[in-house]
Amino acid sequence: MKKTDNNLSSRSLVYAITCLLFSVLYYSSYSQEVTKVMGAVKDAKTGELLPFVNVYFKGTNIGATTGFDGHYSLEVRKPVDTVIASYVGYFTQKKAIQRNHFQVVDFNLQSENYTLSEVEIRPGENPAEVILKKIIQHKDDNDPDKVPNFQCEVYTKMQFDVNNLNEKFTNRKVMKPFQFIFQQMDTSTVNGKAYLPMMLSESFSNLYYRKMPRARKEFITASQISGVENASMSQFAGSIEQDVNIYDNYIDLFQKNFASPISSLGLLYYRYYLVDSAFLDGKWCYNLMFKARHKQEYAFTGNFWVNDTSWAIKKVEMRMVDDANINLINDLVISEEFEPASGNQWMLSRVHLIVDFNIVNEAKKTLGFYGSRTAIFSKYDFKPVRDEKIYGTPTNIIVADNAVKRDKDFWIKTRPEALSHRESSIYRMADTLKKMPIFNTYLNVIKTVITGYYVKGSFEWGPYASTYSFNSLEGNRFRIGGRTSNKFSTKVMFDGYLAYGTADKKLKYKAGLIYMVGKTPDRILTASYKHDMEQLGTGDDAFREDFFFNSLFRRNPQDKLSAVDELKWAYKHEWWTGFSHTLGMNNRKIYTLGGEGIRLYDALADTGLAHKQISTTEITLDMHYGYREKVLAGEFERVVVSSPYPSLDLQVAYGIPHLLGSDYEYYRAKVRVSQWFNWMSAGWSKYNIEAGKTWGKVPFPLMKIHTGNETFWYDETAFNLMNYYEFVNDEYVDFLFTHHFEGFFLNHIPAIRKLKWREVVQLRGAFGHTSIKNLEYNYLPTGTYFLSKPYFEAGIGIENIFRFIRIDGFRRLSYNDHPGTSSFGLMISMNFNF
């Protein structure tokens, strides 16, 4: 769809996604060894739901407190047969339960009849807030990230399940071959949904942490993922990927800034209640419950236990508020447990996170997924590592060569807790799936929809959205092409296409290859040759020229295309994740289509002469640096998914005259800095600044063509009210600043709040200058100008309309006298964000 074609490791990842949709393993008749109970506690007389009620299994220390809604949930692997509810002012009630089953157990508590003596209540400070202030006062002492050094062992388990599997779904025709898998289901205590386990991953790792300079490295020594034999996928099975620090003021989850319940500004977001005190593992602790002060905040509801001497968090259980302005997630539950590991230093011992995904918010009948991750930490050591080279490794997650070769006995002996029978069966399920032709058929269909390519053996045909397109120069354009699949090779990939236009009656084509010299860190060699049409001066996020919808969403005819012959190669050398150099060479011929060509000054003729072709050969050196970047890596594709720090890109280029027919000698340099960052609970911002300069006498297509957009589709990387070819310069500065309020204002308007719309504003501008020799050399075509004064445009928009539509209104603030331009425009786009 976009010019930047990031297919995001489609071959390996699509299999995991498909496993969430289909399963064909016959589960054995083992009984579920986990006892699960959930329910509500009410006043027997009034029917009022009771918060703060203690509910626990008899004979254990496993229990919970009912939330503000009077509900509770419990599960235990121990043999239990009774659950008890107790509350001050009510008679304690016991109920028998069935072992190894899920069940709903509600309590109706009878009030005790006794008279209280008169009590005088005087105003004073909320004791819960007093405790909170103590916690905040001691945060630096208890925050694990403030420890100078530590290393530990980590066991991580991640599971995906399909939920909301109802009778209508299981009886569908396409599911007939899989009927026997639905004979046994499980039920979650998170929200009572029935689910079927689908995919499981496990890993053992050694985690190393250093505060100054900050570094966090994880060495995965053992890993297994159901249905995935690719060792590179093990990088996503470690503990670093789910780092949630309760001591941070804000917790970044799914690109949203959730206020921590022990944030230094916690009183702005939460109300606190002291509900209990007790000994936990020999430590006297207070139990505080909390809930959000305002509607639709990025906040939690839940409770935590805090030690009364160190003021360290012992245990926290928190749940995303049910009206949070977030997409695709119906529920999010996080629990963390801490233990003193050295003196008074408390460290994480266990983390459990459960997410309920669903395309439709608040869906009760639509097929959805659970994603859960459990990490168990042990064997803490606070001494500095003997070999500091550990922190010099190029990536943050390193997978041992033999990590995926551990046998069954290894896992049985080293797991800190045994898998349930249902969990164990997931591995057998994956092996069975791969052997069934009907499953592989469904897999191919889903791959085609997600990646845009149809996989057939060693080849992938596509992208299908470019099979047909239309423009005024080529007329009807038909294209066929594809690339080799991972079945052909995971080290080299060939790609190419043929295209033909019915109006110009010319054949276009491209052929290329990617050769992975090395992986993690990457050493990548690429080469390609292209003979095709190209729209100069478009942004990186623009539609491909032959993308079908590019023919539809246009405000001007697509008549500014150029013909291009391009031979290029490049070698990328990644030193470590986030830092790389790329050396490349590019031989390029640009042909004008129609008209008199590109007019350039000729000293002998003392006038401008038309040129139908511009030929260049240039060598480039690029550098990219992104501090603490996280990258999704497939066999060939790499996509940066997050980094809260600025990223820096530098490029220098030299145009080599006479080499391979090159007509021009020039030098070019450009630098770009970009970053996104949160503004507490007021949303997040993103900026991009790019500056560049070209030295030498060159035709305007070799200068900076400021990126325009002649479609009604919003392009973040372009000036959306600027035409193609409208402005050129040989030195320039472009900038963009965007702020996403995430509903900060609209969430507080009752009539609009339920729509969960989100506000976005932006300002972008361009500054430019052109040297006298290039001013004199170039005769610009009609509609093209040298930028002499700043260009600005501003926009305001609403996103998250129907959860994925965004509409922006733009105002052009300068150069409104140019013909063929508009001072105002509406743009539409689709964004699938949380």
Image (cartoon, helix red, strand yellow):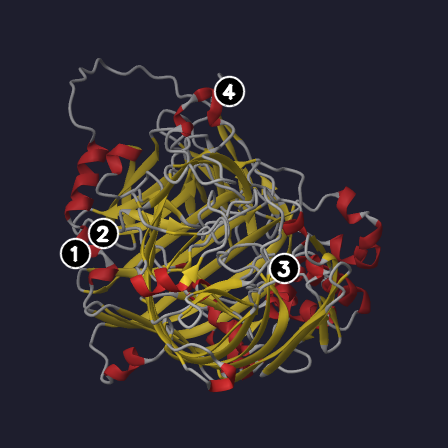
Q: Position of residue 346 (x, y in %)?
A: 24, 59
C-beta proximity under 8 Å, tags 1 and 3:
no
Residue 312's disc is 2
Q: Nearer the viewer, mark 2 or mark 1?
A: 1
The residue drawn where x is 28% and y is 78% is: 391
C-beta proximity under 8 Å, tags 2 and 1:
yes
Residue 594's disc is 3
Is 386 situated left or right of 731 in this image? Answer: left
Residue designated by label 1:
141
Query: Crowdedness of circle 2 by 10 Å Cα count: few (<14), some, many (20+)?
Result: many
In what element is the residue under mark 1?
Answer: helix
User: Does residue 357 show up?
Assistant: yes
In what element is the residue under mark 3?
Answer: loop
The residue drawn where x is 30% and y is 34% is: 269
Of the residues shown, which amino acid type is indicated by label 1? Asp
Of the residues shown, which amino acid type is indicated by label 2? Ala
Q: Nearer the viewer, mark 1 or mark 3?
A: 3
Disc 4 versus disc 3: distance between alpha carbons?
A: 81 Å
Residue designated by label 4:
47
Quarter occupied by the N terminus: bottom right
Of the numbered discs 4 and 2, the one sitting upstream in the chain is: 4
Asked whether 503 or 764 is in front, the reply is: 503
Asked whether 531 or 615 is in front, the reply is: 615
Residue 394's disc is none
Disc 4 versus disc 2: distance between alpha carbons?
A: 37 Å
- Relative height, residue 158 to residue 55 (above, below): below
The residue drawn where x is 71% and y is 59% is: 474
Asked whether 583 or 776 is in front, the reply is: 776
Of the numbered discs 1 and 3, the one sitting upstream in the chain is: 1
Of the numbered discs 2 and 1, the one sitting upstream in the chain is: 1
Of the residues shown, which amino acid type is indicated by label 4? Gly
Of the residues shown, which amino acid type is indicated by label 3? Gly
